Amino acid sequence: MPGKREDHISWDEYFMGIAVLSSLRSKDPNTQVGACIVSPDRKIIGVGYNGFPIGCSDDDLPWDREGSWIDTKYPYVCHAELNAILNSTISSLKGATLYVALFPCNECAKAIIQTGIRKVVYLSDKYESSDSTKASKLMLQQAGVELERLVTKRKRIELSLEA
């Protein structure tokens, strides 16, 4: 009898893979971020990606990063973490883990803390020197949210939609 397959992905790689796959739904031409919320018993309870709120046109609102604030994407975009929270399938996220491609900003950190998410696993911290990220880390640490950068030898997970 053959043994089990040994090259399967880990739970962390699986849930981060869902977050990264979700990011592919983002229409942002510069930054695509996805998030996946997982219950303590490893059930997916929320996913999201960065984009405009439901009913707000991806064609009519700006995607610009620079210019007058009102003419940029920043007042309109809902971040992946907040979308995952708002899209959650259960009423309480207490004790959950959030998998996200990019370390959360200070605004998302507030939502993470308020909902009772206890752990954040992230891939990139490319804005670690920004005031937003510094404030986020301070709040998350003070609230006792565990922070973990996903370290994996696996650089890609390939999907095929061929039958």
Image (cartoon, grey):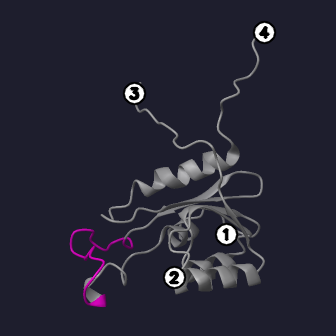
Structural distance between the alpha carbons of marks 4 and 2: 55 Å
Q: Which kind of residue does numbered mark 3 sit on? A: Glu
Front label number (4 vs 2): 2
Task: Give the number of callouts.
Answer: 4
Quadrant of the image for the N terminus?
A: top right
Q: Is residue 66 magenta?
A: yes
Majority secondary structure of the magenta segment? loop
Q: Give the amino acid type for the residue marked by disc 4 in the picture.
A: Met
Q: Nearer the viewer, mark 4 or mark 1?
A: 4
Q: Earlier in the sequence, mark 4 or mark 3?
A: 4
Decide which of tag 4 and tag 1 comes sooner along the chain.
Answer: 4
14 relative to 48 in the view: left or right: right
Which residue is at 47% across, 72% downward? Answer: 79
Drawn side of residue 117 relative to residue 163, left or right: right
The magenta stretch spans residue 88: no
Locate residue 14 relative to residue 144 in the image: left or right.
left
Cβ–Cβ below 8 Å for labels 1 and 3?
Answer: no
Q: What's the distance in space between the residues labelled 4 and 1, CA to CA?
A: 45 Å
Q: Is residue 89 visible?
A: no
Say what secondary structure mark 4 lies in.
loop
Residue placed under numbered mark 4 in the picture: 1
Q: Is residue 136 visible?
A: yes
**Is 152 left or right of 86, judged from the image as shown?**
right
How many angstroms separate mark 1 from mark 3 (CA)? 36 Å
Q: Residues within 10 Å of mark 2 (few under 14, many from 20)?
A: few
- Distance (Cα) linking label 4 and label 3: 30 Å
Q: Which residues are magenta?
A: 52-69
Residue that carries the numbered disc 3 in the rendered image? 162
Residue 71 pos. (x, y %): 25, 85
Residue at 54% in and 86% down: 131
Label 1: which residue?
Answer: 91
